[in-house]
Image (tube, rainbow, N blue to C red):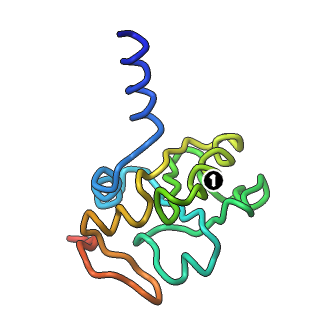
Amino acid sequence: MKDQIAFYENKLAYEIDPSDLYEALQKDVNIVAVDARQDFGFESEHIPTAINLPHRLMTEESTKHLDKSKTYVCYCDGIGCNASTKGALKMTKLGFKVKELMGGIEWWKFDGYATEGTKPTKGSIFECAC
């Protein structure tokens, strides 16, 4: 049973679902969404407030401007794409605290959250009360 508990604790430590990410981004809890796809994917559609850092371009130089006190949530298209896994691995090796978004942008949209870009989808959006 200890192994199983450790498995689930580790899974929660390294993955996040769309609703938890949405809530964290709304509350601005020191978390950054990272679109690990190529530029054209990001430009077409991305999670609001996300930054684009394609996994193929992740290096010490390309990430030196990022704050290592934040948690970075890597995502890609969805379960048929592993750009988020590659990005999460690279960022972890570079010393960042990282999680991977379960289901990518597809599950983000499936859960009813909006996207931005040249082909945005409507859904729940972040609203600031200030």
- Whether 36 is drawn above or below 92: the answer is below
**Residue closer to the observer: 23 or 44:** 44
Instruction: Please identify the residue farthest to the bottom as the structure is shown.
Output: 118
Left of 121 or right of it: where is 81? right
Q: Quadrant of residue 130?
A: bottom left
Query: Residue shown at 70%/57% (left/top)?
Result: 63
Left of 122 or right of it: where is 97? right
User: Percent from the top left, x then y, of residue 88?
Assistant: 59, 48
Q: Quadrant of residue 10?
A: top left
- Whether 25 is drawn above or below 51: the answer is above
Instruction: Please identify the residue farthest to the front as the structure is shown.
Output: 80
Image quadrant occupied by the N terminus: top left
Circle 1 crowding by C-alpha within 10 Å: few under 14, some 14–19, many from 20: many
**Residue closer to the observer: 52 or 85:** 85
> Disc 1 marks which amino acid?
Gly
User: Percent from the top left, x then y, of residue 110?
Assistant: 29, 66
**Residue closer to the observer: 62 or 54:** 54
Query: Residue shown at 33%/56% (left/top)?
Result: 18
Secondary structure at badge 1 equals helix
Query: Residue shown at 41%/56% (left/top)?
Result: 103
- Would you name the residue on which mark 1 appears? 87
Query: Residue shown at 48%/38% (left/top)?
Result: 14
User: Percent from the top left, x then y, of residue 45?
Assistant: 46, 79
Left of 45 or right of it: where is 27? left
Q: Quadrant of residue 108?
A: bottom left
